[in-house]
Amino acid sequence: LILGETEVKLKKGEKVSINTEVRDADNDTVAVKAISLDESVAKATYKDGKVVIEGIVEGYTTITVSAEDGKGGVDVETIEVEVIEERN
């Protein structure tokens, strides 16, 4: 599991997509999940090879991205997220 970025700063209400690369040595099908440790700050989903992060409120959280092949092969990476309030 390779992430395009491991640190993200985004505005409240903004969505950011991060490219991922998932490889399995045995060419097994791999299930990928993205979970925010604090969904009140930012939400995360995995779709079409990308982790999509949406800023909810100002703050910090960590997104955990995991890839499992169902046969014991597991890889976990993290993305540090800062959500900022847009200032005028």
Image (cartoon, grey):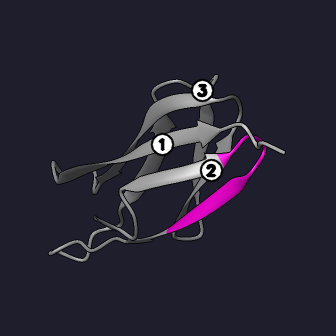
Q: Residues within 10 Å of mark 2 (few under 14, many from 20)?
A: many
Residue hosting label 1? 81
Q: Residues within 10 Å of mark 3 (few under 14, many from 20)?
A: some
Residue hosting label 2? 10
Q: Position of residue 2 (x, y in %)?
A: 29, 68
Residue type at numbered disc 3: Glu
Q: Is 42 on the left or on the right of 78, as rendered?
A: right
Residue type at numbered disc 1: Val
Q: Main secondary structure of the magenta part?
A: strand
Residue hosting label 3? 39
Residue type at numbered disc 2: Leu
The magenta-colored residue range is 11-18
Q: Residue at x 17, y 74 (%)?
A: 26
Q: Position of residue 53 (x, y in %)?
A: 60, 49
Q: Is 41 on the left or on the right of 29, as rendered?
A: right
* Local secondary structure at mark 2: strand
How far apart are the two marked residues, 1 and 2, measured between alpha carbons?
8 Å
